[in-house]
């Protein structure tokens, strides 16, 4: 296969600079609203990055590093618009274009020889994107999706990197394992414990030991590092299967007590359950992620009976919270995220016999809630427990969090 991975450089910040030429040549960051405690850096341009500004850090901290930093609010409608324009350029060269967020795409150009070699196609695409949108992209050219992604990360901004069957050992195997897709901090730590620090170590390690430690994912990582990733690029407009549904929020003030966190978890569980039913799924694994006010991050999951009922998700998430956080004896919480995975489709309204009597009643109740919310908005009706706690007056949720729920 001949695969390109195209990555729009500093996408959000670059769009903002394109929309407002006065921002050119300055230190720019796209950020949330500091008044609602979502005041963190969402994206930054190269100049700000060189000053040490990091995605996810608070605005005040970023400005200590870069006093001249200009923070602008996000304009997601424009990001979607530019993403579609750029994707239309990609589709001139192949119908196999697979998105990975708004700013990244894989392209299979195996059968696009009429336009030149894969490298020549990459160069043409880079030039067209710059000329037609004012944005720049970095492109990785390789024979697997994993290596193409690695290539686009190696040279930024506005560059093309080729990782071939001839040079991949020299280029890829010297890199730390964290550079490869699917390897986060948690997985990196576990690999390091096994004596695996570089992608060369991973490629030449024991697949048996990796499978024992990580299951089927271990074998997948091993093969990806060896250039044996055979996953194909999906055709344009082909959606990925939904793997999980989650919702999170950063609260207006720190959550100090279990009562604070309890109400937030229920609200998030209700939103997740509503989306599961809307998509036609039940799930059997509940996830809870917490971020303390020192920005340390932790998460856990547990398996439950398949459900799309808010109560079930809430009780599982609450148990996870108690295993992760010690309430007033611990550091206060800044944000919470509730998610459900292990999904499979159900025919809603026709599977009542699958559930016990309690679930049967709860499910009927939640279907009525769905009908009301569909007509009048998510917050047209809610739980008395949430109203009793008065999340708004207690300064936990912002007005933005409580806007009518949209898909």
Image (cartoon, grey):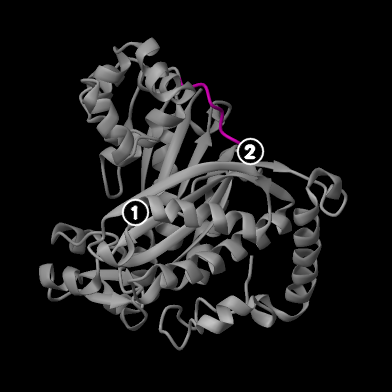
Q: Is residue 295 left or right of residue 305?
A: left
Q: Report whether 21 appears left or right of 309.
A: left
- Residue range (magenta): 229-236
Q: Magenta residues: mostly which secondary structure?
A: loop
Residue 233 magenta-drawn? yes
Q: Position of residue 403 (x, y in %)?
A: 57, 79
395 up-or-down from 209: above or below: below
Task: Report whether residue 8 is seen.
Answer: no
Instruction: Decide if residue 51 is on the left or right side of residue 79.
Output: left
Pick whichever, 48 or 191, lies toward us. 191
| 400 shown above or below 365 | below
User: CB of mark 1 within 8 Å of CB of mark 2?
Assistant: no
Residue in the image at 42% along x and 78% along y: 396
Residue at 28%, 35% in the rendered image: 178
**Image location of residue 258, percent across then percent down:** 40, 67
Element assignment for label 1: loop
Q: CA distance from mark 1 to mark 2?
A: 23 Å
Examine the image and state in which quarter residue 180 appears: top left
Q: Which residue is mark 1?
A: 9
In the displayed structure, would residue 99 be above or below residue 23? above
Q: Which residue is mark 2?
A: 235
238 inside magenta stretch: no
The label on residue 234 is none
């Amino acid at each position: 296969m001949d695969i390109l991975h195209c990555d729009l450089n500093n996408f959000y910040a670059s769009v903002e600079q394109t929309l407002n030429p006065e921002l050119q040549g300055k230190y720019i960051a796209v950020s949330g609203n500091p008044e609602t405690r979502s005041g963190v850096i969402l994206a930054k341009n190269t100049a700000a990055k060189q000053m040490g500004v990091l995605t996810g850090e608070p605005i005040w901290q970023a400005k200590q590093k870069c006093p001249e930093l200009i923070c602008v609010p996000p304009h997601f409608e424009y990001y979607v618009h530019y993403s579609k324009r750029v994707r239309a350029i990609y589709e001139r060269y192949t119908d196999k274009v697979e998105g990975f967020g708004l700013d990244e795409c894989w392209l299979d150009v195996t059968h696009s020889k009429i336009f030149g070699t894969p490298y020549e196609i990459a160069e043409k695409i880079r030039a067209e994107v710059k000329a037609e949108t004012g944005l720049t992209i970095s492109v990785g050219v390789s024979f697997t999706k994993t290596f193409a992604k690695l290539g686009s990360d190696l040279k930024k901004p506005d560059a093309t990197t080729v990782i071939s069957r001839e040079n991949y050992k020299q280029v890829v195997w010297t890199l730390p394992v964290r550079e490869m897709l699917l390897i986060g901090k948690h997985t990196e730590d576990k690999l390091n414990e096994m004596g695996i620090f570089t992608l060369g170590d991973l490629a030449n390690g024991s697949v048996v030991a990796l499978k024992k430690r990580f299951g089927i994912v271990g074998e997948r990582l091993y093969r990806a590092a060896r250039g044996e990733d055979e996953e194909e690029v999906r055709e344009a407009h082909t959606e990925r299967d939904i793997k999980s549904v989650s919702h999170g929020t950063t609260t207006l003030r720190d959550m100090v007590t279990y009562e604070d966190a309890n109400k937030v978890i229920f609200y998030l569980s209700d939103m997740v359950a509503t989306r599961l039913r809307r998509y036609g799924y039940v799930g059997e694994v509940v996830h809870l992620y917490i971020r303390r006010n020192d920005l340390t991050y932790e998460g856990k999951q547990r398996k439950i009976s398949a459900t799309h009922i808010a109560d079930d998700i809430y009780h599982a998430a609450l148990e996870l919270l108690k295993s992760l956080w010690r309430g007033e004896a611990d550091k206060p919480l800044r944000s919470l995220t509730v998610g459900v995975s292990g999904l499979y489709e159900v025919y809603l309204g026709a599977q009542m016999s699958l559930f016990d009597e309690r679930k049967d009643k709860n499910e009927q109740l939640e279907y009525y809630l769905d009908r009301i919310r569909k007509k009048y908005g998510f917050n047209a009706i809610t739980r008395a427990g949430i109203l009793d706690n008065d999340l708004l007056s207690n300064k936990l949720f912002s007005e933005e969090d409580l806007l009518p729920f949209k898909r």
